[in-house]
Structure formats: structure tokens, C-alpha cells
Image (cartoon, grey):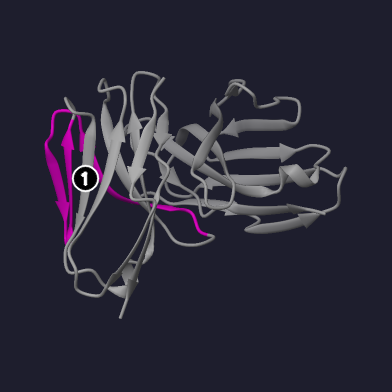
């Protein structure tokens, strides 16, 4: 199956700083990428959907100015958590889908801890 | 709005047992339903994907069924092993083209 990577796998940052998470499709061109967050022992909640070259579409309740998403190429999307606060601490997972198939492939996730 | 629920929330069984995990969804107008496995602190691994026109899919010891009319899907795990211990998530895709995830079932298989 297709492979999606994320970097970093974990990050600790101080409150007020910004953190960038990368999501890459390694062996296919991802026309659509999805960003999810997951709190402990809870399910995945979709944050936003991005199509290559277009602005991301955010889910209701997700602050677009806080969670900046860039999908500038067919193999890379980035999520930047701006002015992070402890309540932003979570597990962030990206997913990618290619043009020729509808199945989504998921990255390994990034654990963000804001102190 | 689609809501996906999984029962039970947690399950602990001895090795060798056959298991059934349940997934129910409120809106039967789905394109497909997918089962995933998630190990602690890890991403998702796709197990099975059932199209809306299909009744079931099989992969090794796993069998997933889909009954759209009743809004249910089941994941059957035969001859469970300790390595099957993980959280199992189901997710439906509808006309919004988004995956809506269930609440998950945490499975522990002990030797």
C-alpha cells in the first residue's frame, strides 16, 4: 500500500511558540490531504481537508488562524500550530489520498506536548 | 449528521477466542465503510474496506460485514492472538467525502 510519513514523530515546545508538522506521501501523489487530532482514549476528529494548491477547508470549531495548513505540492502538506498552548497538546495524524484511488492512507502521527 | 458508534468500548479475552466487534452508523447513505487498527501511540493501519455494494470482505483471520439497511458493520477476528491487541476503529464515508470515525474498541488478548 501507499506510504505516508510524518515529521517529527514527537515534539515538546513551550507555550506561545509555534510548531510545524510535516506530512509526506512517499510513493504517490496526494491530491488531497487530511489533518486529524486525537485526544487520549478518544477517536480521530477531522480538523481540515486540503487540496494541492488550494486553501484548506476547516471543520467547524477549528481555528484556521491557529492551525495553519499548507499543501503546496503533491507530496507535502504542513500543519503549523501557532502560539501553542497546553490545551493544544494532542496526537496529530495526517492522511493522504491520491487522484486515482479513494482510499486514504494514514501517517504514523505526531505527539505534540506544550509545556 | 453521521454518528458512528462502536460496541464494546473495551474487550479482554484469552488467546484463541473468536471475536466480534460491532460498529453502527446513523446515516445508511454511505459509500463505504473501513476498519482500522491503531496500536498505542501509533497511526492507523487499514484492515478492510467494504464498498456500499458489498456485503463482506475477508483478509486472513479477519472478516468484515456490512448491512447498510440496518446501519451496522461487524469485524470478526478468528482465533485471536496476543498480537491482535490494539484499538480497532471503524469509519464511514458518505457524500461529504469525509471519513467519520467511530469511538473505537480497545482489545486485549492475553496468553
Residue at 38 percent of width and 24 percent of height: B2
- Residue at 55 percent across and 27 percent down: it is A50
From this viewpoint, is residue B109 visible? yes
Decide whether the magenta segment is chiefly helix, strand or loop: strand
Residue B9 placed where, x, y %? Answer: 39, 51
Closer-to-camera residue (A70/B64): B64
Q: Is residue A14 left or right of residue A111?
A: right
Looking at the image, residue A67 lies above or below residue B19 = above
Q: In the picture, residue A54 is in which quadrant?
A: top right
Q: Residue at x 72, y 43 (%)?
A: A88
> Is B57 contained in the magenta span?
yes
Q: Which residue sits at x=20%, y=33%?
A: B51
- Locate residue B93: give its quadrant: top left
Tally of numbered tags: 1
Q: Residue furthest bottom?
A: B111
Image quadrant in which you'd find residue A71: top right
SS of the residue under disc 1: strand
The chain to which mark 1 is attached is B
Nearer-the-camera pick, B9 or A7: B9
- Percent across and percent down for residue A20 are 72, 44
Q: Which residue is mark 1?
A: B74
Task: Evaluate whether residue A74 shows in this view.
Answer: no
Above or below A43: residue B105: below
Asked if B16 appears above or below B25 in the picture, the reply is below
Q: Position of residue B79 (x, y in %)?
A: 17, 69
How busy is the neighbourhood of tag 1: few (under 14 within 10 Å), some, or many (20 plus)? many
- From the viewer's perspective, tell me whether residue B48 is left or right of residue A110: left
Q: Which residues are magenta?
A: B42-67
Question: Is residue B108 or residue A84 the one in the foreground?
Answer: B108
Left of A3 or right of it: where is A35? Answer: right
- Across and down, in percent, residue B54 comes to 13, 34
Query: Would you say residue A72 sits in the magenta stretch?
Result: no
Amino acid at each position: 500500500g501507499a506510504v505516508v510519513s510524518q515529521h517529527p514523530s514527537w515534539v515538546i515546545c513551550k507555550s506561545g511558540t509555534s510548531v510545524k508538522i510535516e506530512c509526506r506521501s512517499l510513493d504517490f501523489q496526494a491530491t488531497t490531504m487530511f489533518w486529524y487530532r486525537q485526544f487520549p482514549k478518544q477517536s480521530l476528529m477531522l480538523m481540515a481537508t486540503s487540496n494541492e494548491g488550494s486553501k484548506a477547508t476547516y471543520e467547524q470549531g477549528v481555528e484556521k488562524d491557529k492551525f495553519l495548513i499548507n499543501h503546496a505540492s503533491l507530496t507535502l502538506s504542513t500543519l503549523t500550530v501557532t502560539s501553542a498552548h497546553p490545551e493544544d497538546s494532542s496526537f496529530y495524524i495526517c492522511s493522504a489520498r491520491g487522484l486515482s484511488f479513494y482510499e486514504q492512507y494514514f501517517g504514523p502521527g505526531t505527539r505534540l506536548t506544550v509545556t | 449528521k453521521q454518528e458512528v458508534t462502536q460496541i464494546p468500548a473495551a474487550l479482554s479475552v484469552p488467546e484463541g477466542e473468536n471475536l466480534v466487534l460491532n460498529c453502527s452508523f446513523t446515516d445508511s447513505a454511505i459509500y463505504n465503510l473501513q476498519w482500522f487498527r491503531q496500536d498505542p501511540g501509533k497511526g492507523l493501519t487499514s484492515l478492510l474496506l467494504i464498498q456500499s455494494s458489498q456485503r463482506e470482505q475477508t483478509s486472513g483471520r479477519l472478516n468484515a460485514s456490512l448491512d447498510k439497511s440496518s446501519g451496522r458493520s461487524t469485524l470478526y477476528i478468528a482465533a485471536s492472538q496476543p498480537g491482535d491487541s490494539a484499538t480497532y476503529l471503524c469509519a464511514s464515508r458518505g457524500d461529504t467525502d469525509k471519513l467519520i470515525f467511530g469511538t473505537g474498541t480497545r482489545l486485549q488478548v492475553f496468553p
